[in-house]
Amino acid sequence: MDPLKRFLVAVAAIAVGGVSAAAEQPAHIAGPEQPVPTPAADGTLNLLTYNVGFMRIALLGIVFYQPAAFVDERFASLPEALLSSGVDTIALQEAFGRDRKETLAAEVRTTYPYAAWWPKTSRLRQSSGLMVLSKWPITAARYEQFANNPANEAMVTRKGFLEAIVELAGRPRLRVFDFHMTAGGNTAASAAASTKAVRAGQIRQVLAAAARPFDGATILLGDLNAGPGASDENYRLVRDTGYVDVFAAATGDSAAADHLTWDPRQLLIANGPRRHTVPRRIDHAFLPSVEGERIAIEGVRIVFKINAVPVEGGRRVPASDH
């Protein structure tokens, strides 16, 4: 049997879960100080994409913008959640803060000894928030900043995509593209024509990078901020370029009411500034359609839906807003 025939994308999305010059820079790769045994290859691979929602803009202790509350409490719960997921490789979005990335990498290192992220940050602007964790060695990684971003969004963060090469034991290499497209910043709705135009440019930039020759399998994982019934033009741009929506392929129903990764009824959204948004499936895994001959999608599920994180007042909230 082809070693990739039982390639498994078990988690395709996480539940309810201006203009700048394009820049390409090497990413930081963290690994164990001593060699560690790699997991045995059984022909399957479980992948997870997760927007952890750690965006918080603060100055001198004053919080100016925080879309999802209880950042510290949710961050404290994240290592246990990831370790319990049972997946092999993880693509995170909105994992802001260099200290948080380093702490997270250290706390999950027994299961995910390899991590990659773009380390640049400053007091005024946060990093990309992208991070890849893996049971198998990450041998190369690079970050590419988007050429286009809404001006007010570009003031506080550096959106782009993270490309990481994972060496799978006994199988072809895996090239992961971890991305987070614009939601419009604070001045334009996610479905506004201006937002969709910027997002289309960001999508094309990722697709152009993914079209580069590579000896192995490629997968796109992340927060598209678009999906079936939500900025369809952006969603179709990926599919029309020759990619398979793993979730839709696995379920046969890409727009079912219970297939949401952004749900305004979810506690962190219902009590936040984005409570009036519409429900949609915006977190995705995409495989190049040409991989269909050697990769079988065995399953997909939406995870982390329960209110598991204890917060003030004896309440519990989800680990993230999507």
Image (cartoon, rainbow, N blue to C red):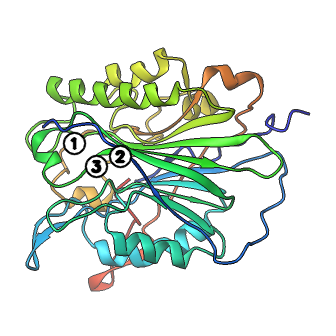
In depth, the one of 155 and 188 nearer the eye is: 155
Type of amino acid at the residue the image marks with label 3: Pro
Circle 3 — which element? loop
Q: How would you rate the neighbour count of disc 3 (Cα within 10 Å): few for under 14, some for 14-19, many for 20 or more?
A: many
Horizontal relation, residue 187 to residue 22: left or right: left
Tell me if residue 151 comes above or below residue 270 in the rendering.
above
Where does the image place residue 256, in percent across and percent down from the top left? 47, 32
Q: Mark 2 touching mark 3, by CB under 8 A?
A: yes
Type of amino acid at the residue the image marks with label 2: Trp
Horizontal relation, residue 60 to residue 299: left or right: left
Q: In the image, what residue occupies the spot 61% across and 35% down?
A: 218
Give the labeled residue for mark 1.
Answer: 277
Q: How many marks?
A: 3
* First of labels 1, 2 by sequence position: 2
Where does the image place residue 242, in percent across and percent down from the top left? 54, 17
Tell me if residue 153 comes above or below residue 245 in the rendering.
below
Give the labeled residue for mark 2.
Answer: 262
**Is residue 255 visible to us here?**
no
Q: Mark 1 touching mark 2, by CB under 8 A?
A: yes
Give the labeled residue for mark 3.
Answer: 264
Q: Nearer the viewer, mark 2 or mark 3?
A: 2
In depth, the one of 81 and 105 nearer the eye is: 105
* First of labels 1, 3 by sequence position: 3
Q: In the image, what residue occupies the spot 22% across and 33% down?
A: 148
Q: CA distance from mark 1 to mark 2?
A: 9 Å
Q: CA distance from mark 2 to mark 3?
A: 7 Å
Circle 1 — which element? loop
Where does the image place residue 166, in percent across and percent down from the top left? 64, 50
Type of amino acid at the residue the image marks with label 1: Thr
Horizontal relation, residue 291 to residue 224: left or right: right
- Give the quadrant of the N terminus: top right
Q: How would you rate the neighbour count of disc 2 (Cα within 10 Å): few for under 14, some for 14-19, many for 20 or more?
A: many
